[in-house]
Image (cartoon, rainbow, N blue to C red):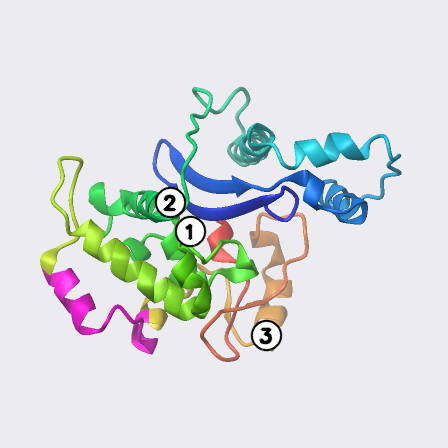
Amino acid sequence: MSSVYLTEVYGFCIMGNHFHLLVRMRDGDNYSDDEIRSRVKRYYKGEERLLTDGQLPFYRAKFSNLSEYVKDMKQRFSRYYNRVNGRRGYFWGDRFKSVIVERGDTLVNCIAYIDLNPVRAGIVERPEEYRWSSLGYHVQSSNRGELLSTDFGISEYGEMDEKERVRMYREYMYEKGDIENEKGKTIDKEVIKEEREKGYRLTLTDRLRYRTRYFSDSGIIGTKGFISKYYQEFKSYFNSGKEKKPKRIVGLDDIYSLKYLVKN
């Protein structure tokens, strides 16, 4: 959706009965007609549409509108979920709630609050262990496709490379996650101590550990040739109408997975 809508995604977290999403909607007037046309094409999955100049303002406004973005995202998920589970009818409960957030300390606090949801709920000890959150996505997929913004709303982060910005954000979030509150669990003090000793840097061992889910969740894992061979043999077992292709696992040389698990 972010390749179509004019959004900058700062953070997200999908929980059992709700989700959090922190985005900035960009002004459509800052994009050329050609860029809007290309996004329309992606919106209709590559289908060529003859757009008149009079139609461009409609899509420019649509792609920069938060309500349209969330509505489209929820509708697409509802159709997918209903199709997979053989159900019909409306999926979501209430309309989404939105607030305006100031950049700087307020914004990074809001991202941290979102990423700490699984810790407060007692699901994980470390926020990056939860795959359905922005920090989990940063760590487990190395921000594949550059889905997420990495400036975290802090201007000082702009001079750092992406890896250092993520490290600084993890430090900020872990320290914030140590603060006692009445809304659930906090990050264990021993975990905080371990991270402080490492300077909040992710070691190669950490990165491999957070990607071990590929070894239990993937349909097939191995070299590209191995996957291609056995996919043809077991093709009927995969619930997909499209031909699947091996995808490289970020951080593991020449090791591929049959599917991108972050999309599951």
Q: Which residue carries the number 1 mark? A: 153
Residue type marked 3: Lys
- Residue nearer the viewer, 87 or 236: 87
- In magenta, the rendered stretch is 190-206
Crowd tier of the residue under label 1, counting other residues whose Cα lies within 10 Å: few below 14, some 14–19, many 20 or above: some
Taking the image as shown, residue 39 lies to the left or right of residue 3, namely right
> Tag 2, which secondary structure?
helix
Q: Residue at x 36, y 72 (%)?
A: 208
Residue picked out by circle 2:
107
Where does residue 207 sit, x and y in percent of width and height? 35, 70
CA separation, marks 1 and 3? 39 Å
Q: CA distance from mark 2 to mark 3?
A: 41 Å
Q: Which residue is mark 3?
A: 224
For label 3, the crowd category at 10 Å Cα-Cα, with few meaning under 14, some 14 to 19 and many 20 or more, is some
Distance from Cα at disc 2 to Cα at disc 1: 6 Å
Q: From the image, state whether disc 2 or disc 3 is nearer to you.
A: 2
Would you say residue 259 is visible in this rendering?
no
Q: Which mark is first along the chain, 1 or 2?
A: 2
Tell me the kind of residue under disc 1: Gly
Q: Position of residue 25 (x, y in %)?
A: 56, 39
Going by the numbered disc 2, the residue's amino acid type is Leu
Please tell me whether residue 17 is drawn above or below residue 108 in the rendered image: above
Q: Marks 1 and 3: which is nearer the front?
A: 1
Q: Going 55% across and 22% down the picture, which residue do you hit?
A: 88
Q: With 98 as the anchor, is 179 left or right in this view? A: left
- Magenta: main secondary structure equals helix
Number of dots carrying numbers: 3
